[in-house]
Image (cartoon, rainbow, N blue to C red):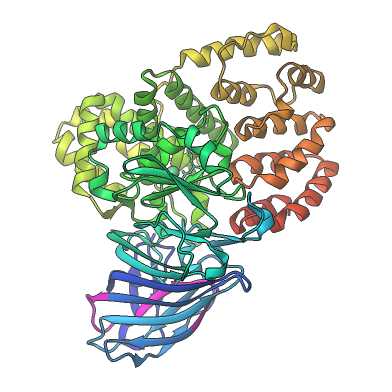
């Protein structure tokens, strides 16, 4: 799983790095602190300025090798005397970008790199005023996970490398925009100078560095949390996410004090083109507006991103092959938080069942021996974002659930706290987790070790036979109605009293894909799905509509695909549209219209589907 990089510089011929998704020699040279100084140019859609890196050199002969993607390097200066540095680019790799190699003198512990970004930087989205709610001002945001930080700064872009950072961001003052980062943030716009300063004094990996510049307002929710968003949405969002404070308390009961680690937990409501449901940028979680269903039914996403404050941001997967350590553990933790704030397990168990169903669906669709169904993956020479899926999230969740089932919740949570404490602000691999389990829990107990079945869970494809069985009373109610409907095809026959979004998602996803148009028309007539505003319901509904040629819904599908941008919700609809030549043709036309509004990540996922 390691890759070799041979440098033209013969002073260090070969460096082994265990992260296959970085060119950087992060074991030879550590970045201690990063300072970012950038000006935001909305007209040219570029960031330009410099980064300063403070280094700790473990190998004083090694040059500094950094990751970049479509960056323009202007100048490099070395050390306190700012001597002009020699640098060179390696060959371009479609997935990894280009290595930037900088020759260092033995005494250099500081490097300054002047550079600018390209208008199509993969980690940035530049929105025109018409793509915002306000309609008057441009909007810029970054998503650095997994390996997109390198498209907006030269850096060791590996989750194995952590550093503190500070920044100075300057925005044209006449635009009157607010700048926010994954750091200590301002609450108000600086209308005079447009200059903002930031500090993150905890060591974090590059994928957690974020920047947003837009016409934003702030509303406090509690003493240590609040909401940023365009003024048209902050109040609606404040109502939707009013339970955030409760979630923080619930999470603290499980994992320990929050503010000691990250100070604040603020939310930023993103524009609709934001490609994910949420993103756990430290101190400032990004949230897709698709989560605002106006009935608080999708708030588990906040629990998820909050959980990452520990599982992911405090203890981080050292490579993207180990992504389940971030996402699987976070899912487990997310469900616990939801259980606690709901005061019962009803919704949490529905979510657990949905998670299990996604896993089964995925495993049924691939070869039983598919190596990519192993928790610890091997993504060498492939896009690390291939790890974003049912294995890391849902099999990952089930693995941690199985540890809980075998050890008991109390003992497992004790272990979890000890794991988080021991590896605080470190990046880890599965072996570290196992070694810690051996030392703290297994302690030579062979019988316990065999029941935990760690080797099969972590390194074998598919699902171990003895896996947790997830049950949900609410889900059983859904199943009963589902059987009735499948028999009768009559929407009037089913009893859906008290159902929330989760029930509906479970119902729609469990319907036979080719149930037939009349059955769907009946459902639509009774429940008005096509007119609903809840994107989490619309997505599986439109999949059914497409699969059953319910063509009256196509205008609504078109608006949905033009307005939404969250990959998880639009991707299944596009996939369904590829199933007949006519609908594929139609999908290509819709995509041609939608593409300029989509985020670069969404563009590349959908382009691949419609190829
Ligand atoms: N960190 C992820 C989002 C992400 C993953 C961004 C990989 C870029 C690359 C975030 O925490 C996440 O998991 N979001 C989910 C939330 C859901 C599982 C509750 C999403 O966006 O759907
Ligand atoms: Zn996550």
114 versus 361 height, above or below: below
Q: Residue 554 in the image: x percent, y percent?
A: 81, 36
**In front of the other: 457 or 224:** 224
88 versus 307 height, above or below: below
Residue at position x 36%, y 45% in the image: 265
- What range of the chain is rendered magenta? 55-73
Does 301 lie within the magenta span? no
Instruction: Locate the N terminus by quadrant.
Output: bottom left
**In front of the other: 379 or 107:** 107
State the residue lying farthest toward the front: 192
**Left or right: where 479 falls relative to 153:** right
Residue at position x 28%, y 86% in the image: 79
**Left or right: where 242 falls relative to 491:** left
Q: Residue 607 in the image: x percent, y percent?
A: 69, 55
**Left or right: where 134 falls relative to 353:** right
Instruction: Locate the C terminus by quadrant.
Output: bottom right
Q: Quadrant of residue 401?
A: top left
Residue 162 visible in rendering? yes
49 versus 588 height, above or below: below
Q: Residue 107 in the image: x percent, y percent?
A: 22, 87
* Figure disc tally: 0
Residue 453 visible in rendering? no
Q: Residue 499 in the image: x percent, y percent?
A: 57, 16
């Amino acid at each position: 799983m390691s890759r070799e990089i041979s440098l033209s510089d013969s002073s260090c011929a070969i460096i082994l790095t265990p992260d296959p998704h970085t060119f950087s020699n992060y074991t030879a040279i550590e970045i201690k602190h990063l300072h970012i100084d950038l000006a935001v140019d909305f007209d040219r859609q570029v960031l330009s300025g410099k980064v300063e890196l403070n280094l700790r050199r473990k190998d004083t002969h090694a040059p500094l090798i950094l990751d970049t993607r479509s960056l323009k390097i202007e100048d490099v200066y070395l050390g306190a005397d700012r001597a002009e540095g020699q640098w060179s680019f390696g060959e371009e790799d479609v997935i990894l970008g280009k290595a930037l190699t900088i020759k260092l003198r033995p005494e250099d512990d500081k490097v300054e790199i002047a550079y600018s970004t390209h208008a199509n930087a993969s980690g940035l989205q530049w929105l025109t005023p018409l793509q915002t709610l306000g309609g008057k001002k441009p909007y810029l945001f970054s998503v650095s996970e997994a390996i997109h930080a390198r498209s907006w700064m030269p850096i060791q872009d590996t989750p194995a490398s952590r550093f503190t950072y500070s920044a100075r961001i300057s925005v044209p003052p006449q635009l009157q925009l607010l700048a926010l980062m994954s750091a200590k943030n301002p609450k108000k716009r600086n209308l005079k100078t447009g200059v903002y300063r930031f500090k993150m004094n905890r060591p974090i990996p590059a994928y957690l560095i974020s920047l947003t510049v837009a016409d934003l307002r702030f509303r406090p929710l509690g003493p240590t949390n609040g909401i940023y968003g365009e003024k048209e949405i902050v109040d609606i969002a404040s109502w939707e996410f009013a339970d955030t404070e409760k979630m923080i308390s619930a999470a603290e009961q499980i994992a320990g004090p929050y503010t000691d680690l990250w100070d604040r937990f603020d939310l930023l409501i993103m524009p609709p083109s934001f490609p994910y449901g949420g993103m756990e940028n430290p101190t400032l979680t990004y949230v897709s507006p698709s989560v605002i269903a106006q009935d608080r039914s999708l708030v588990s996403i906040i629990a998820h991103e909050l959980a990452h404050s520990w599982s992911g941001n405090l203890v981080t997967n050292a490579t993207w092959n180990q992504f389940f350590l971030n996402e699987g553990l976070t899912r487990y933790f997310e469900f616990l938080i939801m259980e606690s704030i709901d005061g019962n397990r009803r919704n949490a168990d529905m979510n657990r069942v949905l998670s299990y169903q996604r896993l089964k669906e995925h495993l049924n669709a691939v070869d039983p021996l598919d190596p990519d169904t192993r928790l610890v993956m091997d993504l060498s020479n492939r896009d690390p974002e291939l790890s974003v899926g049912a294995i890391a999230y849902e099999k990952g969740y089930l693995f941690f659930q199985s540890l809980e089932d075998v050890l008991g919740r109390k003992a497992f949570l004790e272990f979890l706290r000890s794991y988080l404490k021991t590896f605080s602000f470190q990046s880890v691999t599965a072996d570290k987790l196992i070694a810690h389990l051996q030392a703290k829990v297994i302690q030579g107990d062979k019988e316990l070790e065999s029941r935990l079945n760690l080797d099969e869970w972590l390194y074998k494809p598919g699902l171990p036979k003895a896996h947790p069985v997830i049950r949900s009373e609410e889900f059983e109610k859904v199943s009963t109605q589902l059987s009735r409907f499948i028999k009768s095809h009559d929407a009037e026959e089913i009893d859906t009293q008290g159902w929330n979004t989760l029930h509906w998602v479970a119902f729609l996803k469990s319907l036979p894909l080719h149930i037939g148009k009349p059955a769907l028309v009946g459902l639509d007539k009774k429940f008005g799905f096509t007119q609903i505003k809840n994107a989490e319901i619309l997505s599986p509904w439109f999949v059914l509509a497409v699969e059953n040629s319910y063509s009256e819904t196509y205008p609504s599908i078109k608006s949905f695909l033009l307005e939404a941008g969250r990959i998880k919700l639009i991707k299944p609809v596009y996939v369904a549209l590829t199933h007949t030549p006519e609908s594929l043709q139609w999908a290509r036309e819709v995509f041609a219209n939608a593409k300029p509004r989509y985020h670069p990540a969404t563009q590349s996922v959908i382009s691949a589907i419609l190829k």
